[in-house]
Image (tube, rainbow, N blue to C red):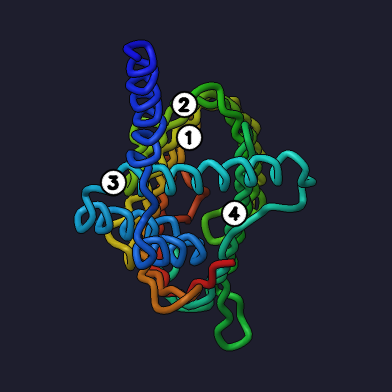
Amino acid sequence: MRSALWRLVALMFAGSAAIWPVSAQAELPPSLQAMLDAAIESGDAGALATVARFAKQTHPDHAREIDEKVNTHQAAVAAEREARLRNASFFRAWSGSGELGGFITTGNTDSSGISAGLALERRGIDWLHKFRANVDYQRSDGVTTRNQWMASYEPNFTLNESIYAYGLATYEKDRFQGFSDRTIASGGVGVRLVQEANVRLDVKGGPAWRRTVWIGEPDTTELNTLAAADLRWQLSRAFELKNNAQAVWSSGNSSYSNTTGLTGKLNGSLSARLSYAVRHETSPAEGAEMTDTITRATLVYDF
């Protein structure tokens, strides 16, 4: 009789042990489940984070289940992205933006005209590829008074979370700055100094080979030192600030440039951007100003 009683007690404890884990992982209420599913289906990571935060505030007893659901979704998205990138060819998985608008310049020319730009980016597992192109053009009374072209390609290879190796190839043309062609090739090391959710700051530097075809002067080929800094600051969901600075030091002519742009979201993929660029040459071509500035107002389309 006593042994039978003990067996009954043991069965009761075993049953309660099996029940406790189930109660600790209670299902989410249907309304809360539907809200999280809607945020997940939207594909907006920021919206999902906001919904999950408020859901945990209003349903603290389900905080663990909410975190598990969000983490499971994020892990699935990351795995899908990695698989897609590993199988994608080099010409796929690019994103970017195009912009078109006008500009006002001071320095070597005081004028206004048309400005267009293209920015492309491909983020892989270890590689980041960036392509940039800009053109500023104006004709007045049948005479070209502004004709500036620039294109650059920069591949980055991630070494660890904060350090990467970079390569950089740049081609530009600016007859009003005194040269018909300028080519720069550089490579070195970059460091991600700040990597926050809304702020990112990268600096990089290394040796640079530069060839300049001057107008009316002998061509020059030099081995220089290049340093650059890229800042991206998401001020709010609607506004973003970017600043790109670059310096090329040379025993002959050193070049410094800085571009600051403020972009405001209008709707969907369309934004408006106001930017200001300064360029300084320590030894420009004869008759050219040392400093040029250009102010651009453009519409930007993200794709």
Q: At label 3, which amino acid type do we have?
A: Ala
Among the two numbered marks 2 and 4 on one chain, the one whose residue lies closer to the N terminus: 4
Distance from disc 3 to disc 1, alpha carbons, whole Å, reads 53 Å
Q: Left or right: 205 with respect to 133?
A: left
Mark 2 highlights which residue?
A: 161
Distance from disc 2 to disc 4, alpha carbons, whole Å, reads 24 Å
Q: Residue at x 44, y 76 (%)?
A: 111
Q: Secondary structure at mark 4?
A: strand
Select label 3 or label 1 by which is in front.
Answer: 3
State yes or no: discs 1 and 2 in contact (Cβ < 8 Å).
Answer: no
Q: Residue furthest front?
A: 1
Is residue 184 shown to the viewer in this render?
no
Q: Secondary structure at mark 3?
A: helix
State yes or no: discs 2 and 4 in contact (Cβ < 8 Å).
Answer: no
Q: Which mark is residue 63?
A: 3
Q: Position of residue 297 (x, y in %)?
A: 41, 74
Label 4: how many Cα within 10 Å (few below 14, some 14–19, many 20+): some
Mark 4 highlights which residue?
A: 132
Q: Position of residue 149 (x, y in %)?
A: 61, 60
Q: Residue at x 32, y 49 (%)?
A: 198
Q: Residue at x 35, y 27 (%)?
A: 12
- Quadrant of image for the C terminus: bottom right
